[in-house]
């Protein structure tokens, strides 16, 4: 049975770690992906990066379907911004920054490459929300958070509120 993992909350310094590439496509990786999917579903998220559950590997899970029955797994995802892109504004949320939403502008045309759980190379030029979500998740793998796109003043306000709410002050 998959198990629910603990999601790190900003400003936890472990959210700043840079994840390492996956090189072993074994049962262990499969179990982590299953546990991350369960964690994401229980938290009502549409995506989750391994960094958020304190596993510093380049692994992302996602489900953008209405019925929450189309899990997707991206190992070692990378993207390249395509020529002719525009900046697309979308209101994002993050399970590691509960209660805060922020409109962020990101390129709307990317080429995405990743591996599946067997280590096979995959590629796609996604459209819509997947474009936004995968950039958000790859930011996590690089230790970057939504709060890095807002003013320092606002970031400090969010930080202080979360420290208080999560009783760590
Ligand atoms: O659940 C999530 N919703 C969301 C909405 C807009 C843009 C990105 C996201 S990802 C987020 C889950 C999360 O924190 N993933 O890292
Ligand atoms: Ni997030």
Image: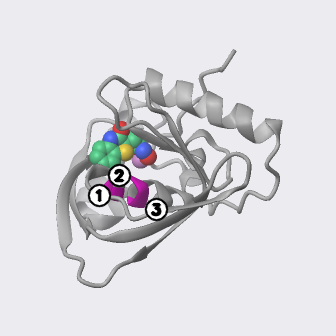
Mark pair 1, 2: CA separation = 6 Å
Q: Which residue is mark 2?
A: 130
Q: Secondary structure at mark 1?
A: loop
- Image coordinates of residue 113 in percent, x first then y, are 54, 65
Which residue: 81% across, 36% down? 27
Contact flag, marks 1 and 2 (Cβ < 8 Å): yes
Quadrant location, the N terminus: top right
* Left or right, residue 6 beside residue 161: right
- Residue 93 visible somewhere in the drawing: no
Task: Give the tally of numbered discs.
Answer: 3
Q: Is residue 125 above or below residue 168?
A: below
Q: Is residue 98 left or right of residue 139?
A: left
Which residue, given by chain and number where applicable, does mark 1 sit on? 127
The residue where tag 3 is placed is 139
The picture places residue 137, in percent across and down from the top left corner, at: 46, 54
As drawn, is 27 to the left or to the right of 61? right
Along the polypeptide, which appears first: circle 3 or circle 2? 2
Residue plotted at (42% across, 56% down):
134
- Taking the magenta stretch, the answer to whether it contains residue 67 is no
Q: Is 87 displayed left or right of 50 in the figure? A: left
- Numbered disc 2: secondary structure: helix
Res. 70 visible in picture: yes
Instruction: Judge the density around disc 2: few (<14), some (14-19), many (≥20) Cα neighbours within 10 Å.
Output: some
The magenta-colored residue range is 131-135
- Image quarter for ligand 1 equals top left
Mark 3 vs mark 1, CA separation in Å: 18 Å
Q: Residue at x 56, y 53 (%)?
A: 13
Answer yes or no: disc 3 within 8 Å of ligand 2.
yes
Q: Are marks 3 and 1 in contact (CB under 8 Å)?
A: no
Q: Is residue 132 magenta?
A: yes
């Amino acid at each position: 049975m998959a198990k629910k993992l603990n999601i790190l909350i900003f400003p936890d310094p472990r959210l700043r770690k840079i994840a390492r590439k996956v090189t072993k496509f074994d049962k262990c990786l499969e179990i982590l992906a299953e546990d991350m999917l369960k964690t994401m579903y229980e938290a009502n998220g549409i995506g989750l990066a391994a960094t958020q559950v304190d596993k510093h590997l380049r692994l992302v899970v996602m489900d953008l379907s209405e019925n929450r029955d189309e899990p997707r797994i991206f190992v070692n995802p990378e993207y390249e911004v395509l020529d002719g892109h525009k900046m697309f504004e979308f209101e994002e949320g993050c399970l590691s920054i509960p209660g805060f939403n922020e409109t962020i502008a990101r390129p709307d045309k990317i080429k995405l490459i990743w591996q599946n759980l067997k280590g096979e190379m995959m590629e796609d030029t996604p459209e819509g929300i997947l474009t936004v979500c995968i950039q958000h998740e790859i930011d996590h793998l690089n230790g970057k958070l939504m709060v890095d796109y807002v003013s320092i003043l606002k970031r400090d306000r969010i930080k202080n509120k979360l420290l208080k709410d999560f009783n760590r002050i």
